[in-house]
Image: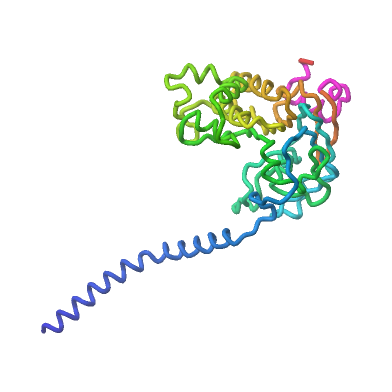
Amino acid sequence: MMKFFLVFASIIFGSQSAGTIFSFAPDMSKARHAASELKALFDREPEIDSWSEDGAPVPEMEGTIEFRDVHFRYPTRPEQPVLRGLDLVVKPGQYVALVGPSGCGKSTTISKLNPWPMREHNQLTNTGLIERFYNPLAGGVYVDGREISTLNINQYRNHLALVSQEPTLYQGTIRENILLGGDRDDITDDEITAACKSANIYEFIQSLPDGFQTLCGSKGTLLSGGQKQRIAIARALIRNPKILLLDEATSALDSESEKVVQQALDTAAKGRTTVSVAHRLSTIRNADRIYVFDGGRIAESGNHSELMAKRGKYYELVNLQSLGKNN
C-alpha cells in the first residue's frame, strides 16, 4: 500500500510540474523566434557603415548641394520608382523649398525617420539621401562638388542637422535634450543660450521655475507641440550645422504655434544652406528657390512670384490651399 501512495504522489506532482512547464511552451517558441531575429540583426552587414573611418575628411563645408540625375527605389519595393532622374542645385546660404503631392519623393531626399522595414506594410518610411542613409541606384549626390559616398560619413554628418515633423525628446531636462545635438563635450552655457535664443525658446525656458533643469517628461509629454519643436530646433543649432534640413517642421502645429516656430526657423536658416520640405506653402513663400516635385522629377523651379506667373503645378497647389487671393 505504501508503494501505491508513493507512485500516486509521484504521478500527481510530476503531472503538475509537467503542466506548469508546458504552459510556457508558447513563450519558449516566441523566445526562440526572437533570438533568431536578434542573431540575424547582429549578423547583418549594412551597406553603409556609420562607424566607418574610410573616406575623405570633411573639416570644413561651404554647403553646396547638388543632385545629378538621381534614381532611387526602396529595396523592399524595387518595382516602385521613387526618384526618376532628379536634378537640383542648392547654393551656399540659400533657402530652398521642396513641394509637391504626397509620395512624389520630397522627403526621400532629406529626412531620415526610420531606416528599418515596416513589416506590416512591407515598406520603408522616409529615408534621406542627403544624409546618406541610402545610396542612389544611379546618379549621385554631391556636396561642395564631392560625391558624398567618397567622404568620411561621420565627419560629413557632423555638418548636417535635421528638424523633423515629430520632434523626439527624451526623459530628462531641457538642457540635457539640447546637449544631445552636440558633437563635442565642451559646449558652454553661452552656446546653449545662443542656440535657444535663435530657436525663440530662451524666454520661455527662463520663465520656468527650474529653467534649463525643467524635466521634459517621457517623449516630451510635459511640453506643448510648439515648445517641443523649438527645443528640437535649439538641439539642431547647438551643433552649428552648415546644412539645415527641415521636414514638415510646422505641419503638426496649430496656427499660433506655427507662427512662433516659423519665426525660429527663419532665424535658424540665416547663414546656412537650408532645404525645407513643406506641405503648408504659406511657410515657404519667402524661399530663395522652390522646386516642385512631380513623379520623382522636378516639374518647376523658381521663387514664389515666378512660379505663380507660370500658372503651372505650383499655382494649382497654392490655389488649393487658398493662398492665391493673398498674392
Question: Which residue, as the protein is rendered here, is positioned at the far left?
Answer: 1
In the image: residue 3, left or right of residue 92: left
In the image: residue 17, left or right of residue 193: left
Residue drawn at x 67%, y 44% is 154
Q: Main secondary structure of the magenta part?
A: helix
Residue drawn at x 74%, y 35% is 60
Q: How many marks?
A: 0
Question: With respect to residue 22, does 222 lie above or below?
Answer: above
Q: Name the image quarter holding the N terminus.
A: bottom left
Q: Residue 151 or 170: which is nearer the viewer?
A: 151
In the image: residue 325, left or right of residue 187: right
Q: Residue 220 in the image: x percent, y percent?
A: 49, 32
Residue 313 belongs to magenta span: yes
User: Magenta residues?
Assistant: 304-325
Q: Residue 283 in the image: x percent, y percent?
A: 70, 23
Q: Residue 198 in the image: x percent, y percent?
A: 62, 21
Residue drawn at x 72%, y 42% is 108
Q: Residue 199 in the image: x percent, y percent?
A: 61, 23
Residue 157 belongs to magenta span: no
Q: Name the image quarter holding the C terminus.
A: top right
Give the quadrant of residue 21: bottom left
